[in-house]
């Protein structure tokens, strides 16, 4: 189930990428291989920044701040973009909400 | 038919119990691998089926198992084949009798499956690219593309420009050393026997196709590894505007394009998936990959190859300053 609405995510929420994913940097982007399905998907620049932030254990509020630091966007826009992206990752089963 | 002899194929010196359609080498040559007739057991407990396909519509089934002891078992048509890297041997058993498969099918099975898979499973950091490779002016160029993209046709046409055949159908790249390993000196073409200059002999691949397998003369092929110059993605187009376009493939799009043309199993192990993915990325970072779009000639002649050679010369071969 994806998270499509910003108000479902709290700033303190932490989302963990699955362990069985292989990530390769290609130029300025990432390609991620899902070892469960042998399918791969690309991350654009925004996706790369969010993915890296999630991978270092940042919470949602910190992820949004990271997006604002890297792109010239308002916090409200960054919040929507980050929520949509994370929702998509959850929908694909690539990240899950950390418990506790 | 049993005929002991030493042959060279896929860069290996193979001491074989069977007659093979590959170049002979001296009986004194250091042997890398023995191809022997023997009993091959069915896959037992702990074996994992990693590949399961029907070779072509109405054709034989191909199954590949990773055995519990690390060996690899191929079950194909009337044969069982054990790839035993520990003892550097390939054991072949014909487990079904009858007329269904003969010497020609056996030789194709050894060339298409047993030997390339022996190399792929046994050598670290190798990548199998669906495509043909030619050594041209000191460097190897691998032609990849969808089925019917003209990979073999291009490779064959390059022989007339002074190229030498490295591999057809499957090109094995040693990513770490950035070289293309030689395959067998054969090529598959939609041509009649008399149309292929330099072929020693030829045969139809199987009953459902008119494509033929041509064994080229030794001097038209390379038996060793050659430094890789680049990968060329052949893309036929109907758009006259695109004809002859030559575009560097990089980044995510380049890697995705390369992965699509990389040999994979239907049920791969995680270690295999990871290695394939990472090796493709390493390869893309270490050598250039280009997409070459071309219009097929109405005659079916490989007229696009002149343009391709001109591109290679302009970008690399005539520019010693250009690092490949």
Image: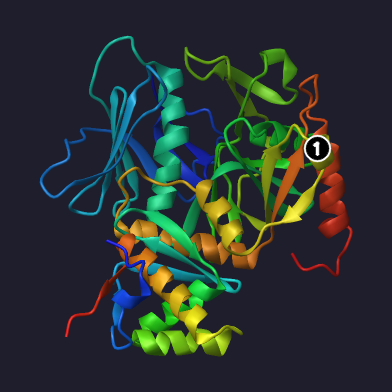
- Chain holding disc 1: B
User: In the figure, is residue A51 to the left or right of B163?
Assistant: left
Residue found at x 32% / y 61%: A91
Of all residues, the one furthest to the left in this rendering is B45
User: In the figure, is residue B225 to the left or right of B106?
Assistant: right
* Percent of width and height locating residue B19: 45, 26
Residue found at x 33% / y 77%: A7
Q: How is the image coloured?
A: rainbow
* Percent of width and height locating residue A99: 18, 80
The residue carrying mark 1 is B305
Q: Is residue A47 above or below residue B171?
A: below
* Percent of width and height locating residue B60: 34, 22
Q: Residues within 10 Å of mark 1 (few under 14, many from 20)?
A: some
- Quadrant occupied by the N terminus of chain B: top left
Q: Nearer the viewer, residue B273 or A57?
A: A57
Question: Can residue B282 be seen in the rendering of this structure?
Answer: yes
Q: Is residue B227 above or below residue A77?
A: above
Q: Is residue A32 above or below residue B50?
A: below
At mark 1, the secondary structure is helix
- Quadrant occupied by the C terminus of chain B: bottom right
* Percent of width and height locating residue B197: 75, 23
Residue found at x 83% / y 35%: B240
User: In the figure, is residue B281 to the left or right of B38?
Assistant: right
Number of numbered discs on residues? 1
Question: Can residue B25 be seen in the rendering of this structure?
Answer: no
Q: Nearer the viewer, residue B28 or A53?
A: A53
Q: Nearer the viewer, residue B232 or B294?
A: B294
User: In the figure, is residue A56 to the left or right of B188?
Assistant: left
Q: In terms of image quadrants, where is residue B241?
A: top right
């Amino acid at each position: 189930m994806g998270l499509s609405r910003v108000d479902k995510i709290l700033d303190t929420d932490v989302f963990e990428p699955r362990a069985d994913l292989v990530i390769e940097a290609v130029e300025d982007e990432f390609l991620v291989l899902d070892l469960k399905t042998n399918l791969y998907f690309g991350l654009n620049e925004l996706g790369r920044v969010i993915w890296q932030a999630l991978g270092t254990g940042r919470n949602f509020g910190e992820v949004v701040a990271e997006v604002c630091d890297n792109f010239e966007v308002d916090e409200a826009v960054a919040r929507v973009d980050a929520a949509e992206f994370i929702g998509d990752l959850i929908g694909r089963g690539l990240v899950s909400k950390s418990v506790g | 038919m049993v005929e002991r002899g030493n042959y060279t194929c896929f860069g290996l010196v193979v001491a074989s119990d069977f007659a093979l359609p590959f170049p002979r080498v001296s009986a004194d040559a250091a042997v890398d691998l023995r191809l022997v007739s023997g009993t091959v057991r069915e896959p037992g407990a702990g074996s994992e089926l990693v590949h399961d396909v029907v070779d072509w519509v109405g054709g034989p089934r191909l199954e590949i198992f990773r055995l519990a002891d690390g060996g690899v078992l191929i079950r194909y048509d009337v044969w069982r084949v054990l790839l035993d890297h520990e003892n550097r041997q390939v054991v072949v058993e014909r487990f079904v009798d009858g007329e269904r498969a003969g010497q020609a099918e056996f030789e194709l099975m050894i060339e298409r499956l047993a030997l390339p898979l022996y190399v792929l499973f046994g050598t670290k950091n190798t990548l199998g690219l669906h495509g043909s490779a030619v050594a041209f002016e000191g460097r190897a160029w691998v032609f990849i593309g969808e089925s019917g993209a003209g990979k073999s046709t291009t490779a064959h046409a390059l022989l007339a420009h002074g190229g030498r055949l490295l591999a057809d159908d499957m090109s094995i790249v040693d990513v770490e050393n950035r070289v293309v390993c030689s395959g067998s000196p054969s090529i598959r073409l939609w041509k009649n026997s008399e149309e292929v200059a330099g072929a020693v002999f030829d045969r139809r691949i199987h009953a459902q196709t008119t494509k033929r397998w041509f064994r080229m003369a030794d001097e038209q092929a390379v038996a060793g590894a050659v430094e890789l110059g680049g990968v060329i993605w052949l893309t036929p187009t109907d758009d006259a505007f695109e004809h002859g376009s030559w575009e560097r493939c990089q980044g995510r799009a380049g890697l995705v394009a390369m992965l699509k043309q990389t040999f994979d199993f239907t049920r791969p192990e995680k270690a295999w998936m990871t290695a394939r993915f990472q090796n493709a990325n390493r390869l893309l970072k270490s050598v250039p990959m280009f997409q070459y779009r071309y219009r097929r000639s109405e005659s079916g002649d490989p007229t696009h190859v002149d343009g391709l050679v001109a591109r290679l010369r302009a970008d690399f071969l005539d520019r010693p300053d250009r690092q490949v």
